[in-house]
Amino acid sequence: MHITKIIATSAVLLGAFGASSASASSAVRAHTPTGNINCVARNYGGPGWSLTCSADDPGRTMSISTRGDAYSTHYRPVARGRGRTLYYGGTYQLGPYRCDSSSSGLSCSYVPSWASHRVGFWISREDAYAF
């Protein structure tokens, strides 16, 4: 009886705070030195991740998922200036994604488990495309 009450109370408390192993989430945030390109890699507790990067000027957003989808979406700004700085000339891990930063833009990619090639995107002030 006592153990049942503890389990029930724990379930109520976890539900009240939105915490469970199925809904646990983590986010990795980053930005380029100028702050124009901002990114967030998210995992909502399952095997899948997503990475979204936005270029504030002129207003571009690119996304990629661990399913192997890379695509342009409507402009959705990512929280500016939060997380680590992606210094030019460096290669960085944002969750399972690899991002290469340069003064001309940011390239982020991922190799899906079913593929032998990288899937990703390029984003800059001048252009954005998936590959």
Image (cartoon, rainbow, N blue to C red):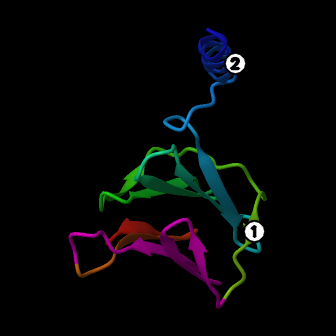
Q: Residue at x 69, y 64 (%)?
A: 30
| The magenta stretch spans residue 109 | yes
In this rendering, would 70 be left or right of 89? left
SS label for mark 2: helix
- Which residue appears farthest toward the bottom when viewing the image? 89
Kindly identify which residue carries mark 2. 13
Q: Residue at x 39, y 55 (%)?
A: 72
Task: Mark yes or no: residue 15 visible.
Answer: yes
27 left or right of 63?
Answer: right
- The answer to whether marks 2 and 1 mark residues whose Cβ atoms lie closer than 8 Å is no
Identity of the residue furthest to the front in this view: 1
Q: Position of residue 90 (x, y in %)?
A: 64, 88
**What kind of element bears circle 1?**
strand
Q: Is residue 56 visible to us here?
A: no
Q: Where on the picture, by quarter, is residue 15?
A: top right
- Amino acid marked by disc 2: Leu
Q: Nearer the viewer, residue 100 or 75?
A: 100
> Tag 2: Cα neighbours inside 10 Å, few (<14), some, or many (≥20)?
few
**Magenta residues (range):** 89-115
- Circle 1 is placed at which residue position? 84
Please report the residue visible at 23 percent of the width from the left and 81 percent of the height from the top: 116
Q: Residue 38, located in which quarter of the rendered image?
A: bottom right
User: What's the residue type where badge 1 is placed?
Assistant: Arg
Of the 4 image quadrants, the one containing the N terminus is top right
Residue drawn at x 22%, y 74% as measured from the top left: 115
* Residue 25 against residue 116 in the figure, above or below: above
Q: Is residue 7 magenta?
A: no
Above or below, comparing residue 131 to residue 69 in the picture: below
Between label 2 and label 1, give the one nearer the viewer.
2
Task: Characterize the local packing of mark 1: few (<14), some (14-19) or many (20 or more) Cα atoms within 10 angstroms.
Answer: some
